[in-house]
Image: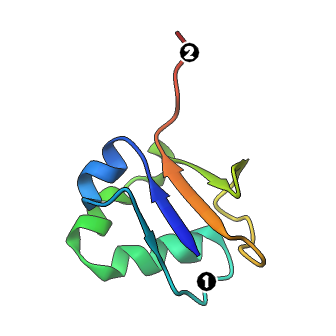
Amino acid sequence: MDVLYFAWVRERIGLPREVVETQAATVMDLVEDLRKREERYAAAFADITALRVALDQQLADFDAPLDGVREVAFFPPMTGG
């Protein structure tokens, strides 16, 4: 699946997007897999309360299933303006 990173998440990981092969069942499982990759991922996902996630461009929760999902995007909460 395509995994997209925005704002400071992208800055910490050093990539705007990547293709990830995973057996993760939920978003949280994917986060755990990514944290284990290396320190930059661990830093980016250290506090998931500071993150939002979208599955196929729809906001979702971290316990959402990944079955059939083609794109996961991680980003900080947005503010109005």
Compared to residue 74, the image places residue 24 above or below, namely below
* Residue 80 image-quadrant placement: top right
Quarter of the N terminus within the rendering: bottom right
Q: Residues within 10 Å of mark 1 (few under 14, many from 20)?
A: some
Q: Amino acid at mark 2?
A: Gly
Give the residue furthest to the bottom.
23
Q: Which residue is drawn at the image coordinates 62% and 68% (left, top)?
A: 27
Query: Which SS class for mark 1?
Result: loop
* Image position of 14 (left or right of 16): left
* Image position of 58 (left or right of 54): right
* Residue 28 image-quadrant placement: bottom right
Q: Which residue is drawn at the image coordinates 41% and 75% (left, top)?
A: 34
Q: Which residue is mark 2?
A: 80
Q: Which residue is mark 1?
A: 24
Circles 1 and 2, Cβ within 8 Å, touching? The answer is no
Q: Amino acid at mark 1?
A: Ala
* Mark 1 vs mark 2, CA separation in Å: 33 Å
Q: Residues within 10 Å of mark 2 (few under 14, many from 20)?
A: few
For the image, the number of numbered tags is 2
Residue 21 locus on image (x, y percent) = 52, 87
Query: Which SS class for mark 2?
Result: loop
Residue 53 locus on image (x, y percent) = 59, 52
Give the residue furthest to the top.
81
Compared to residue 47, the image places residue 78 above or below, namely above
* Residue 18 image-quadrant placement: bottom left
* Image position of 73 (left or right of 18): right
Badge number at residue 65: none
Residue 42 locus on image (x, y percent) = 30, 67
Mark found first going from the N terminus, 1 or 2: 1
Q: Which residue is drawn at the image coordinates 26% and 49% (left, top)?
A: 11
Compared to residue 13, the image places residue 31 above or below, namely below
Observer-nearest residue: 20 or 35?
20
